[in-house]
């Protein structure tokens, strides 16, 4: 499936993905480099929600120390987190 994201949408997503912890930046950037052109609107919404997590909480999820929970425990977020962890 190809993405309908414009160049501006892609730039905004990458800007929102910037994190305070280098480890998060590296994981997320690697994910976006691999999958950015395939992201759907639902993926972008899920990523935007995921990026609302605190840096340490997000790192724990991305490293598999904890699972997503609460408002972050959605099928789309779980799928994207698994893709990030697999890279």
Image (cartoon, rainbow, N blue to C red):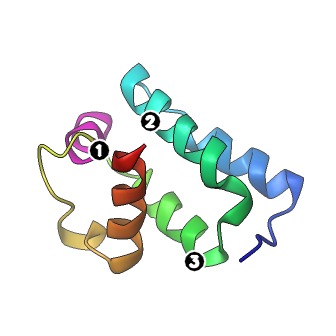
Seen as rendered, the residue at the extreme right is 7
Q: Position of residue 52 (x, y in %)?
A: 41, 52
**Residue lying at the far left of the rendered structure:** 65
Q: Read off the residue under disc 2.
A: 27
**Label 1 sits on residue:** 62
Q: Are marks 2 and 1 in contact (CB under 8 Å)?
A: yes
Q: CB of mark 3 within 8 Å of CB of mark 2?
A: no
Q: Is residue 21 visible?
A: no
Mark 3 and mark 2: span between their CA atoms?
20 Å
- Mark drawn on residue 42: 3
Point 42% across, 20% down: residue = 22
Cα separation, mark 3 vs mark 1, equals: 20 Å
Q: Is residue 57 magenta?
A: yes
Residue 84 lies, in percent from the top left, at 41, 49
**Quick one: quadrant of the C terminus?**
top left
Q: Which residues are magenta?
A: 54-62
Any part of residue 7 in sight: yes
Disc 1 on helix, strand or loop? helix
């Amino acid at each position: 499936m190809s993405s309908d994201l414009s160049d501006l949408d892609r730039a905004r997503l990458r800007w929102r993905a910037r994190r305070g912890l280098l480890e998060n930046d590296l994981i997320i950037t690697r994910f976006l480099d691999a999958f950015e052109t395939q992201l759907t609107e639902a993926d972008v919404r899920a990523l935007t929600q995921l990026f609302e997590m605190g840096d340490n909480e997000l790192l724990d999820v991305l490293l598999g120390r904890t699972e997503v929970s609460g408002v972050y425990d959605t099928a789309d977020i779980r799928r994207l987190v698994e893709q990030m962890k697999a890279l």
